[in-house]
Amino acid sequence: MTAVLGILNKQDVAIAADSAVTIVGPSNHKIFNRANKVFALSKRHPVGIMLYNSASFMTTPWETIIKVYRRNLGDNSFSTVKGYQENFIEFLRLKGFFTDVDLQKLFLRNFLSNIIDSVINEIIKSNRSIVDNPTEDNKREFLVLFEQRIDNLIQIWSSQPKTCPEFVDYTFEMFNPYSEDLFVDIIQTKFIQNAIQISPEIIAKVKELTFSILKSDEVFTSFTGLIFTGFGEEEIYPQLIPINISMVVDNRLRYYIDLNHAASISNSINGAVRPFAQTDVIDTILSGIDPSLDTTYTTNFGALFNKYNREILTILGDSNPLLSAQIQALNTEQIVAEYARMNKQIKTENYISPLMNAVSNLSKEDLAEMAESLIYLTYLKRRITNAEESVGGPVDVAIISKGDGFIWIKRKHYFKPELNQYFFDNYFKT
């Protein structure tokens, strides 16, 4: 895991990231504290990029991809940060997505397998006896439950309004023949080898579900978050555009812009703070309350309100049927939602807005210090509690401004700069 942050005002962008990376193995995982997550996207123009979650794209390290792109970009620039983001996607396409057909199908197989596994595990979790006693009746019951859950998920995912851009015109008739051999293999492994005869109708539903999820801009699949930020040639104020990229299917890049976390400074918006990955500590500072505690308060309020109504109904008994019916008809969900809305307004007025006003007036040095401090506090919380130290290592910090471009404030090197002067001499030659 990781912690990545962008802080914007009208003059600058401060970007910062920790150095922790988690390597997951078959039976355990290990955390290393030397990963690079902040990069200059151009050597000559004020634009940078950060990444979080997966450090590789289809087995190719993102650091390699970003630096190859930077070399290819050269002196070229774009009028907007969005132009850089779109050009980066086009670069991936021109490079064949740094992958081949076999690798694409391998990742798709894992994607399909994970969806089926999640449904199976959900059924097993609540119906353990079906697995412990695999009789023919239990196998038939399992298939009934499996189909019911698939039907429910199809209803949910087929109604999703947002689709990955490159899958808008991708039809099931295209997907079905491309993935047919993968489904045959998965069905053989997960059902037939366990003496479960799954019908063609259920298989068709599984395909429909996986296709619906594949097209959607969901965050459950392993992905890399790429955050483009800085200034385009025609932009006076900084922008921040995050995109989520997961894999390539049938030579189509599965990605989407994370609009919920994008930031655009303008004449009316003076400051913004955008944390990514592990955001709990930063969100606490921004809103004045830990997000999980805030959710707990709202949940407890709803539970207490319902308990209060039940107590009143018990006291009333049969003495006033009309009043009892009115109490039972109360829309408690609407009242809880109003409670949450009032709390949100208080957080906005007393914590978020004053902090954003302060951010809008911070100097370059203060922006950099704030960014580094927020990342460090995220690390510190995990360091002093029983939580896994999944945020740590040196904090890399950079400032991007319209006039000065991309400036490192703090940066770790895997080499000693004083022993490698040629690296800095040659930096702008490529």
Image (cartoon, rainbow, N blue to C red):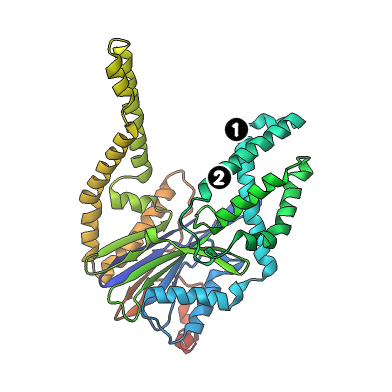
Which amino acid does the dot numbered 2 rest on?
Leu
Work out which residue is located at the far top of the displayed protein and give it: 319
Identify whether 67 is placed above or below 261.
below
Q: Nearer the viewer, residue 219 or 69?
A: 219
Q: Nearer the viewer, residue 154 or 388?
A: 154
Work out which residue is located at the far bottom of the displayed protein and give it: 429
Identify whether 35 is placed above or below 30.
below
**First along the sequence among labels 1 and 2:** 1
Residue at 61% x, 69% y is 251
Callout 2 environment at 10 Å: few (<14), some (14 to 19), or many (20+)?
A: some
Q: Are marks 1 and 2 in contact (CB under 8 Å)?
A: no
Residue assigned mark 1: 126
- Give the side of residue 2 with respect to residue 170, left or right: left
Residue at 25% x, 70% y is 10
Residue assigned mark 2: 153
Residue at 42% x, 65% y is 242
For the question of whether residue 63 can be seen, the reply is: yes
Which amino acid does the dot numbered 1 rest on?
Ser
Residue at 76% x, 49% y is 188
- Give the side of residue 16 with respect to residue 192, left or right: left
**At which x and y percent is residue 292?**
38, 42
Name the secondary structure under disc 1. helix
- Number of marks in the rendered image: 2
**At which x and y percent is residue 87?**
47, 77
The image quarter in which residue 83 lies: bottom left
- Give the side of residue 267 with respect to residue 114, left or right: left
Callout 1 environment at 10 Å: few (<14), some (14 to 19), or many (20+)?
A: few
* C-alpha separation, residue under disc 1 versus residue under disc 2: 17 Å
* In front: label 1 or label 2: 2
